[in-house]
């Protein structure tokens, strides 16, 4: 962080954020809002990097305490290890395409009556 009059606040923010990486709560702890933190990150790449590192370090530290590795994999690398669910879109046992066609036909006939 380059010479910065906000340095004491940024340091207090980082101290809180390193213990609980929640941007809103950490901002509240120093009497600022999240928009201010976002602006600081945009204007100060070193501050932004320190926030990212604090969050990564926190996650790594917490992950070492988790006993259920499957749960951890599912949460952290969800795109690969997460449960996949298949959603069957039907309505009354009919394919949704059939329902949509009937809905469109019904609305078109209603529109035609209203325009007469």
Image (cartoon, rainbow, N blue to C red):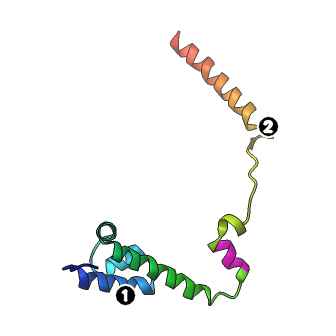
Q: Residue placed at 69% from the left, 88% from the top? A: 67
Left or right: where 62 falls relative to 23: right
Residue 76 makes an appearance in the image: yes
Q: Is residue 50 magenta?
A: no
- Where in the figure is residue 16, as x and y percent of width and height? 38, 85
Q: Is residue 3 above or below residue 65?
A: above
Look at the picture and state if 110 lies above or below 47. above
Task: Tell me if I can see residue 82 in this picture.
Answer: no
Residue at 40% x, 82% y: name it: 17
Q: Quadrant of the N terminus?
A: bottom left
Label 1 Cα neighbours within 10 Å, binned few <14 / some 14-19 / many ≥20: some
Residue 94 image label: 2
* Helix, strand or loop status at disc 2: strand
Q: What is the magenta segment's predominant secondary structure?
A: helix
* Residue 98 in the image, given as x and y percentages of width and height: 75, 31
Inter-mark Cα distance, 1 to 2: 57 Å
Question: At which x and y percent is residue 69?
Answer: 71, 82
Percent of width and height locating residue 90: 75, 42
**In this rendering, would 39 be left or right of 55?**
left
Above-or-below relation of 106 to 32: above
Task: Residue at the far left: name it.
Answer: 5
Would you say 27 lies left or right of 86 here?
Answer: left
> Foreground mark, 1 or 2?
1
The magenta stretch is: 70-75
Which residue is label 1 attached to?
15
């Amino acid at each position: 962080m380059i010479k910065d009059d906000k340095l004491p606040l940024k340091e207090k923010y980082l101290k809180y954020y390193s213990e609980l990486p929640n941007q809103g709560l950490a901002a509240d702890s120093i009497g600022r809002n999240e928009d201010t933190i976002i602006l600081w990150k945009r204007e100060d790449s070193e501050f932004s990097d320190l926030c990212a590192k604090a969050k990564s370090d926190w996650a790594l530290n917490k992950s070492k305490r988790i006993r259920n590795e499957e749960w951890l994999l599912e949460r952290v690398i969800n795109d690969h290890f997460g449960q996949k669910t298949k959603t069957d879109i039907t309505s009354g046992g009919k394919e949704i395409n059939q329902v949509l066609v009937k809905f469109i036909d019904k609305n078109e006939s209603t529109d035609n009556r209203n325009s007469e």
